[in-house]
Amino acid sequence: MTMSSSFGRVVSVLLGFVLVASAANFNQDVEVTWGDGRGKILENGQLLTLSLDKSSGSGFQSRNEYLFGKIDMSVKLVPGNSAGTVTTYYLRSQGSTWDEIDFEFLGNLSGEPYTVHTNVYCGGKGDREQQFHLWFDPTKDFHTYSLLWNPQRIIFSVDGTPIREFKNLESIGVPFPKSQPMRVYSTLWNADDWATRGGLIKTDWSKAPFTASYRNYEADGCVWSSGKSSCSSNSSWLSEELDISRQQRLRWVQKNYMIYNYCTDTKRFPQGPPIECTAP
């Protein structure tokens, strides 16, 4: 499969994948899948908005499926009193034993920080939650949230700063998503039974509609079609890892902004943490 773009057409071979260049535009790359008009693509495909009111939320998904990729999305989250709302941005495969790589943004009362919730599922099993606050107000402007998924690791990043790395540790028996193609999804929905302070703070519908905005969607991935993957021309991410500088930034985030880590939850894992938590 080949796809044309402003960068020209490139076909070569890297790590057994066919490499293909692609461009980004919401009209071309995604489809609004639910919300009865609450999801809108504007500005000739450069802006997408999702809205939530008491009747319904909304969502969109990528037209392509990917088997590995680097996905960037600039998001401006719901401003003001967003308590009870959840904005999601994730990769997910199909079926009952799905794989999934999650960003979820849990709203809060005005002036209180958003919680960034991350998780990795493999074969339908997750339970690998890490949560963070951010070092900026994510409602004032667009910030770029990135998911890097290659055969060696998954890296969650915010404005280029890594906040989490999940390594492929199949060698010690830890499942890793590597065989099921995944689509990009994003939704805005009401989850006031759990999203804010465990469900204690409910959605204030007098503030509706709630709106999240998206720009600069870039999917540099291995497009899955007819049982094979076709990758973009710039596929250095297929072997990307964190250099020393980015490892230091990751440690800075985890020291100063991580608010929950399943690896240190002794009440949840009284017999000791999952094995990936103690791997080097």
Image (cartoon, rainbow, N blue to C red):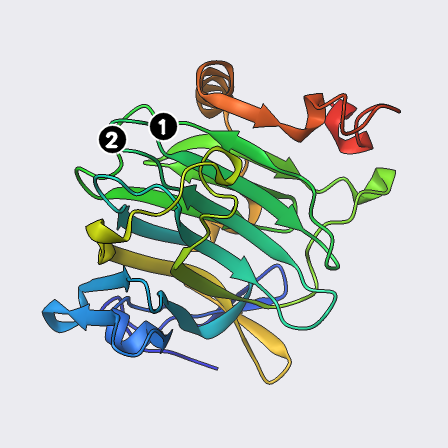
Q: Is residue 123 left or right of residue 119?
A: right
Q: Where 232 falls versus 138 (above or below)?
A: below
Q: Which residue is mark 2?
A: 137
**Disc 2 packing (10 Å; few <14; some 14–19; many ≥20):** some
Q: Position of residue 60 (x, y in %)?
A: 37, 69
Query: In the drawing, does residue 144 fall left or right of residue 181?
Result: left
Looking at the rendered structure, the number of numbered marks drawn on it comes to 2
Q: Which mark is residue 56?
A: none
Q: Is residue 79 above or below residue 216?
A: above
Name the residue rendered at 58%, 67% in the picture: 17
Residue 62 pos. (x, y %): 41, 71
Q: Residue furthest bottom?
A: 226
Q: Residue at x 76, y 32 (%)?
A: 276
Three-letter code, disc 1 = Leu
| Label 1 sits on residue | 134
Specify the quadrant of the image occupied by residue 241: top right
Secondary structure, mark 1, is loop
- Residue 83 is situated, as x and y percent measured from the top left of the image, at 35, 41
Mark 1–mark 2 distance (CA, rounded to whole Å): 7 Å
Residue 189 figure quarter: bottom left
Judging depth in this view, the residue of 122 and 265 nearest the camera is 265
Query: Which sits in the foreground, 42 or 197?
Result: 197
Are discs 1 and 2 less than 8 Å apart at CB?
Answer: yes
In the rendered image, which quarter contains the C terminus? Answer: top right
Report the amino acid beneath label 2.
Answer: Asp
Residue 68 shows in this picture: no
The one of 111 and 218 positioned closer to us in this rendering: 111
